[in-house]
Each structure stands twice: as C-alpha cells, then as structure tokens.
Image (tube, rainbow, N blue to C red):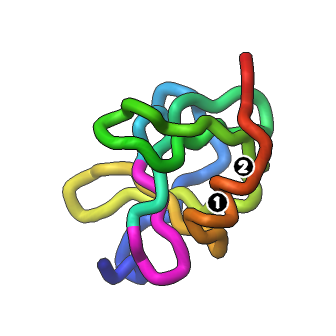
Amino acid sequence: MDHSNHVRLSQAELTPDVLEDATIYGPGDEKIGSVDHAHGTQVVIDVGGFLGIGAKPVAVPMSELEFMRDEDGDVHAVTSWTKDQLKEMPEHTD
C-alpha cells in the first residue's frame, strides 16, 4: 500500500473513537496488529492471534505511530516496529 497519498490525522483527530480498530502496518507494509483502544498518550495494539482470538495487547506511545486516512476514509497507522518486536513487549492489562 502506498501511504504517501494518505492524509495524516491532525492532533484533534487522534481520539479513541477515531483510532479504535485501526490497522497497524509495519516496516515491510505488513499488517502487524490493530488498535484495541487508546487512552491518553498510549495506544493498545492487539498483536497476533486470529480474528481477535489469542491476540496479545501491548501498549505503545501514540507518538511512535503515524496515523492517516486512506482514499476510502479508513484510518490506519504505520510504524517502524515489527510484529516480533511488539510480541516481545510486556502484555498490557487494564
């Protein structure tokens, strides 16, 4: 996916409602997870699993993700982290 034409979200758009379920893409443009929820400056990403079952939630700083909207209006993010790096992070518990 070519993210260069996608519109970056403004700070005002970085709300839990907008970010929930956003797909996260890693450095090779592979899908590495999705946003479970956001709170404050943290985003909880579900990594691994299948259809949400068995996924590991990890909390990451929102500043480490570049959120944008594609041509269809769908919100997603890109990061330099790989799926393996996220899986190595401690599990987030609410």
Residue at 72 percent across and 56 percent down: it is 88
Tell me where residue 68 appears, x and y as whole percent: 47, 60
Dot 2: few (<14), some (14–19), or many (≥20) neighbours within 10 Å?
A: some
30 relative to 70, above or below: below
Residue 62: which disc? Answer: 2
Q: Nearer the viewer, residue 14 or 81?
A: 81
Do the CB atoms of the residues marked 1 and 2 lie less than 8 Å apart?
yes
52 relative to 93, above or below: below
- Quadrant including the C terminus: top right
Tell me where residue 75 appears, x and y as whole percent: 39, 50
- Quadrant including the N terminus: bottom left
Q: In this view, does 45 lie to the left or right of 85?
A: left
Query: Mark 1 sits on what residue?
Result: 65
The part of the image, by quadrant, that contains residue 67 is bottom right
Q: Is residue 38 left or right of residue 5?
A: right
What amino acid is labelled 2 in the image? Met
Q: Nearer the viewer, residue 3 or 89?
A: 89
Tell me where residue 52 appears, x and y as whole percent: 37, 33
Q: Give the range drawn in magenta.
A: 23-30
